[in-house]
Amino acid sequence: MFTTLLIDDEPIALGRLKRLLAQFDDLIEVVDEALNGLEGIQKIETLRPNLLFLDIEMPQMTGFEMLSRLSYMPMVVFVTAYDQYAIKAFEENSIDYLLKPVEKERLAKTMDKLRNLRPEQEPTLSQESLRQLIGSMVPKKEMHSISVKSGDKILFVPLSDISFFQAEDKYVLLNTVDNKQYLMNYTITSLEEKLPSNFVRVSRSTIVNSTKIREMERYFTGKYMIVMLDQKQTKIESGSTYQENVKRLMEF
């Protein structure tokens, strides 16, 4: 039996989903409902359900944002109005989804999938897969430069001049191909979400510009040493948990 929390800002949609789930009372026990992300966080942390049925587009806080703030991660079935192209991201991350309005036949397929899982099983949506999912679903704005402070001036550094970004302690440094460095106010995670797709995170602390890589060589335990095209030919070691991202570099 999966203890289940329903989260949707539309009471009508919540009521419909609850009625449909009542037909699967041998598998699903709806323990509560929430009408927004903040309420959802509070109830998840208190009730610690096995499963969420989660709306994505909610005011103040999206379903993605709500998940990123959790200390406890249940299994998730997204309820979404995204189109078929965007839904590919859900499939690649092994996360189930339901298109609005939820149909009985499609819900039954979700139930069949759940019957092959255990309520206490580790969820497929880890923090890392959540990060990848958000990156897949949220289109990045077109950017040509990024602003940095230099004394009393604001400089606009063209993205084409950037070799890599690297976090050091609480700061992030922008490194250019001519080996200039600028201190930034962004976190490495916020930069990852902001930058276009040719900027790839290869470790917890580093994002590289894939167009500024000279070569890559295999390193220890599945890692790679990435040599950049900057004047110093900086060497960057990839992180063991970022192997999928490193594979992406080989596809550019």
Image (cartoon, grey):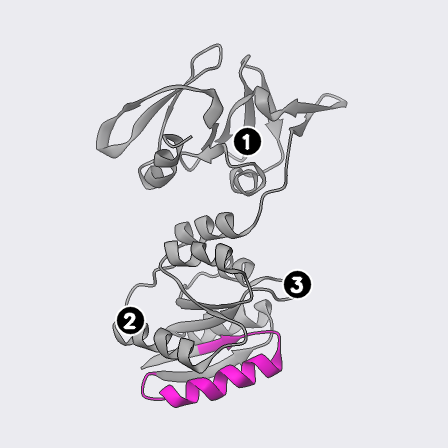
Residue 93 falls within the magenta-colored stretch: no
Residue under numbered circle 1: 172
User: Given this view, does label 2 or label 1 mark the residue nearer the observer?
Assistant: 2
Q: Residue at x 50, y 47 (%)?
A: 135
Pointer 1 and pointer 3: residues touching (CB < 8 Å)? no
Could you give the CA–CA distance between mark 2 and mark 3, rounded to whole angstroms?
31 Å
> Any mark on residue 60, and which?
3
Q: What residue type is labelled 3?
A: Gln
Determine the residue positioned at 47% across, 21% down: 212
- The one nearer the camera, 140 or 232, is 140
Tell me the element at label 3: loop
For marks 2 and 1, give the CA distance: 39 Å
Sequence order check: which comes first, mark 2 or mark 1?
A: 2
Residue drawn at 36 percent across, 34 percent down = 246
Per the image, the residue denoted by label 2 is 120
Q: Quadrant of residue 252?
A: top left
For this orientation, the residue located farthest to the left is 221
For discs 1 and 3, the disc positioned in front in the rendered view: 3
Labelled pair 2, 3 in contact (Cβ < 8 Å): no
Vertically, is 21 above or below 73? below
In-front residue for pair 58/47 = 58
| Image: magenta residue range | 5-27
User: Residue flagged by tag 2: what amino acid is it?
Assistant: Glu
Circle 2 crowding by C-alpha within 10 Å: few under 14, some 14–19, many from 20: few
- View extreme (right): residue: 152
Mark 1 burial class by Cα count in 10 Å: few <14, some 14-19, many 20+: many
Q: Relative to residue 244, is residue 231 drawn left or right?
A: right
Tag 1: amino acid: Val
Q: Which quarter shows the N terminus?
A: bottom left
* Crowd tier of the residue under label 3, counting other residues whose Cα lies within 10 Å: few below 14, some 14–19, many 20 or above: few
20 part of magenta stretch: yes
In terms of secondary structure, where does tag 1 sit? Answer: strand
